[in-house]
Image: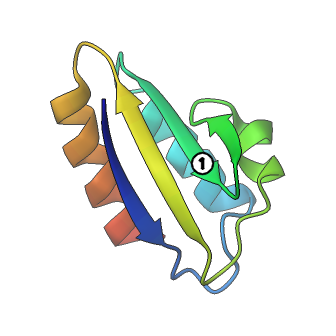
Amino acid sequence: MQKFSYVIKDEIGIHARPAGLLVKEAKKYESKIQIVMNGKAAGATKLMAVMGLGVKCGDTVEVEIEGADEAAAFEGMKTFFENTL
């Protein structure tokens, strides 16, 4: 399993549009990708679960990646977070 932490910089946090983009990015990989915040976890391919975390600007999330293509998924998701959120 690989994981990284990220502080959300988007002023509005993970609302509908960026959550949709996040889900689209996560679906590119075979690996199981989870977003964890304050002890709550959501599968990154599930839009309502991601939005249900209520992630706001300044919140720190942990992204956990496990599976066959976790190295590629780790790089892809890390780049996505840095460029989008």
Residue 85 as seen in the image, left or right of residue 66: right
Residue found 25% across the figure and 27% down from its top: 70
Relative to 5, say whether 24 is above or below. Answer: above
Name the residue that disc number 1 marks: 36
Toward which corner of the image does residue 32 lie, by quadrant?
top left
Alpha-carbon neighbours of circle 1 within 10 Å: few (<14), some, or many (≥20)?
Answer: many
Residue found 37% across the figure and 33% down from its top: 65
Circle 1: element type: strand
Number of numbered callouts drawn: 1
> Tag 1: residue type?
Val
- Classify the position of the N terminus by image quarter: top left
Q: Position of residue 58 (x, y in %)?
A: 60, 84
Name of the residue lying farthest toward the front = 39
Q: Position of residue 3 (x, y in %)?
A: 34, 45
Residue found 60% across the figure and 48% down from its top: 36
Residue 83 as seen in the image, left or right of residue 72: right
Relative to 55, say whether 64 is above or below. Answer: above
Residue 1 as seen in the image, left or right of residue 43: left
Relative to 58, say whether 15 is above or below. Answer: above
Asked which colour scheme the image uses, the reply is rainbow
Q: Nearer the viewer, residue 45 or 66?
A: 66
Residue 47 as seen in the image, left or right of residue 61: right
Q: Position of residue 9 (x, y in %)?
A: 51, 82
Residue found 27% across the figure and 34% down from its top: 73
